[in-house]
Image (cartoon, rainbow, N blue to C red):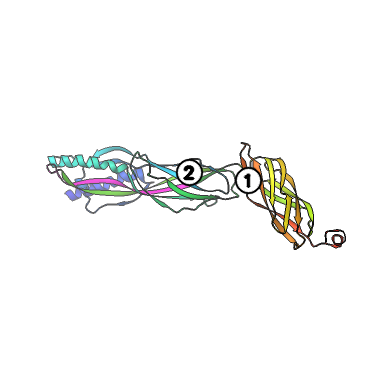
Amino acid sequence: MRKMIALVCLLLFMVSGVAGAYDTLKAYSVPISFDLGENYYKVDGSPDISATIIGSNEFHRGQTVTLNIDLMNNGKLLGFENDRTPDNADEIFGAQTEMKLESAVVDATGIVASLSAGPESPIEIRSVSQKIGSIRSGQNAVSPARFDIKIDKKAKAGEYNLYLNLSYDYQKNVQVMDPDATAQTYNVNRWYGMMVQNQTLKIVVKDQADFEIINTTGTLYPGGEEIIILEIRNTGEEEAKNVKVMVDPSDPLSTTDNVAFVSGMAPGSTAVAKVKIKADSEAVAKVYGIDTVIRYETPEGDIEYSDALQAPVEVKEPGLFQRLFGWI
């Protein structure tokens, strides 16, 4: 009869439990020794972990950063349901002990965290899943979850979603066995479940100025020096003020005037920078790349530098005119 009662209680418990937690319930591990016919209470509650990015969530395109994510357990104990009424001193002691132990239903243990981005996202997640440990209800993780991310250089300004997956165990039910009120002893069976929570975190790729060199004009010959004109476009979303174009040619090219000033560049606009470049007399005729960096001021007054750009400059074979009137 007792086994029949235990079986009925088990079925009722599973039906009532699954209805409210199906989205997060992944698996149960029920001990063979667990006898619900001997259980005093069913408890209502579970862990509930929230995640928050520590510090700013705004970054520039092209950045590699470490996201620090704080985890807090907001689990709540909602109440107890009486399964069986104790009828002697030992059972009263066992019931009181079980009630105390059941309160751990809101604690999360063995937390594993992983982070992902959508298939078309310009955000690359460079960290694998990591173990966080345990978090009791009302507490934060001892240390934050840390994930390295890389933002693509061509990412558009705007808001992007990252998906945090948390899986952990929690104590689903407790059974106190062989309580002895006089000796204050007992044995415990614990029934654990696995929970999964998925949360969306948002990061922002900030508006910023970006640049590309769309054209260069000017002809160089070995041993000659000429004004090379660089046409530059602001491909970003933000205005660049007090722009300086700084060039750094390497052998066999050189310059005595490596900075050109441009007043300002609105998004989508182009500007012209003129720099004086000299080619060594032994320079081989071909196209050379001149390292170019744009220094500019943001609308907030901050000084920023672009990534190094390559300005193509061609050194040509001298023709008859250059041979007769030129530098060789």
Any magenta on residue 182?
yes
Any magenta on residue 290?
no
Q: Give the x, y percent position of residue 4.
A: 19, 49
The span shown in magenta is 162-183
- Disc number for residue 201: 2
What amino acid does circle 2 point to?
Leu
Count neighbours of disc 2 (C-alpha within 10 A) and say few if under 14, some if 14 to 19, many if 20 or more: some
Q: Which of 234 and 2 is in front in this view?
A: 234
- The first of marks 2 and 1 along the sequence is 2
Please give left or right for residue 249 compared with residue 89 in the image.
right
Q: In this view, does 54 lie above or below 323?
A: above
Q: Give the x, y percent position of residue 274.
A: 75, 47
Q: Residue at x 18, y 42 (%)?
A: 94
Task: Point out the frontmost of discs 2 and 1.
Answer: 1
Q: Is residue 246 above or below residue 297?
A: below
Quarter-of-image position of residue 48: top left
Please give left or right for residue 126 compared with residue 302 in the image.
left
Quarter-of-image position of residue 302: top right
Please give left or right for residue 25 compared with residue 229 in the image.
left
Q: Give the x, y percent position of residue 325.
A: 87, 59
Count neighbours of disc 1 (C-alpha within 10 A) and say few if under 14, some if 14 to 19, many if 20 or more: some
User: Which residue is denoted by mark 1 in the rendering?
Assistant: 305
Alpha-carbon span between mark 2 and mark 1:
29 Å
Tell me the chief SS of the magenta region: strand
Q: Quadrant of the C terminus?
A: bottom right
Q: Which of 263 and 170 is in front in this view?
A: 263
